[in-house]
Image (spheres, rainbow, N blue to C red):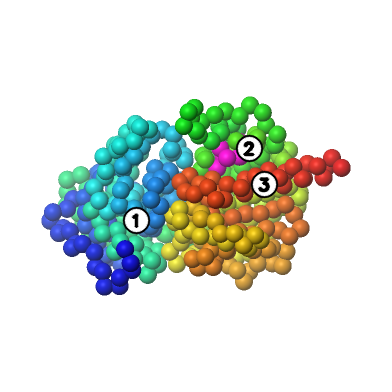
Amino acid sequence: MHEDSHWSGPAPLQPEKCNAALVLQDGSVFWGFGAGLSGQDYKDTVGEVCFNTSYTGYQEILTDPSYCDQIVTFTSSHIGNVGTNNQDTETKQPSVRGCIIANDITTPSNWRSSKGFNDWLVSNKLSAVTGVDTRQLTRKIRDSGFINGLIAYPNSSAIDINRAIRVINEFPGLLGLDLAERVTCKKSYTWNETTWNSSSGYGKITDTKFKVVAIDFGAKHNILRCLSSLGCEVIVVPAKTSAREIMAFKPSGVFLSNGPGDPEATGSYAVPAVKQLLQNNLPIFGICLGHQILALALGCKTSKMHHGHRGANHPVKDLLTSKVEITSQNHGFEIVKESLPKNVEITHKSLFDNCIEGIRLKNKPVFSVQYHPESNPGPQDSVYLFQKFINNMKKNAKKKRS
């Protein structure tokens, strides 16, 4: 459908016919019908409202730790059509606050489905609102910027809009909020599961060539699987692990994972640790929050975006090859271009808004990207970046031997 500034969408639902609503901080109310868990305290369902333009992967999106304290609006109209399963989760327990859907949850029709989407929401203690004009909501966020909101889906009592707005106003928002420490693992562990295939599911790696320490700021499982599938022994460590503790593992390289929240809020632990790691000339690869933390360690600044990038259809230009990649993204912060030091080179940029999507150090095997090259969900244009990390570790090992 072509963009039409006069398009107003379907007629708004009447409050007396609805049992749930999305309430926004500015007092706007999107009425609809509840799905998932009802009767939650309003404080459990307040978060930053964002939109995701992916056509597939709703289960991976809702289990991505990068969505901690957010409410995801799905612009795709068919949510629930492939059901849910035990293989497509990106973390054990979702940290998202809920989701907004245009239509009723679709009946699952997929051979991999083991549970309907509504039942999955209930089992994960998540609430949703269906029947919402998601086009109008998306345009509101796109035009006005990020906004906090609340899913009101009481069990039996009437929806208290005034109380909902009070709860929203108490929510601090994501700016300045350290969420990495909330979603990170509690203790170190070794990951050895490889990527999925239709005949045998997930595999187990038996022969490793490199030891990679992955700092968990909210790591997705499929990122770890990509590393493992390329011959890496992956040791996952908590976000507050020191550089000294990381180096004690004698790693071939260090991976800085994705994660939620404001990167500057990690300034007391993650940024200093990465600064020290940079002094060891180890190959380092960062994505998403890890990309931003690396940038801070290099002396850059970050800022909150107007409404962020979230979806699996974002074009990014590789400035080193002039190739365009279609990427999967989920971020609400970005590197401030004017703050880059001379030894940092921009390698990728967004073709939507020209924001920085990749950087590298000119004199060390260190690079990072803002998007998600593991492509779960999304296109696989950027999977080559994992091999680039492997190649850097190979070159570094060869240099040490010589």
Horizontal and vertical percent for residue 287?
Answer: 58, 51
Q: Residue furthest right?
A: 402
Instruction: Write the start and end of the magenta stretch as one range.
Output: 223-228
Q: Amino acid at mark 1?
A: Thr
Q: Indicate yes or no whether the magenta region holds residue 185.
A: no
| Distance from Cα at disc 2 to Cα at disc 1 | 34 Å
The tag earlier along the polypeptide, 2 or 3, is 2
- Assign the N terminus to one quadrant of the image: bottom left
The residue that label 2 is drawn on is 230
Residue 129 versus residue 6 in the image, above or below = above
Q: Secondary structure at mark 1?
A: loop
Q: Are marks 1 and 3 in contact (CB under 8 Å)?
A: no
What residue is rendered at 72% in x and 47% in y? Answer: 392
The residue that label 1 is drawn on is 75
The tag earlier along the polypeptide, 1 or 3, is 1
The residue that label 3 is drawn on is 389
Query: Neighbour class for label 2 at 10 Å: few (<14), some, many (≥20)?
Result: some
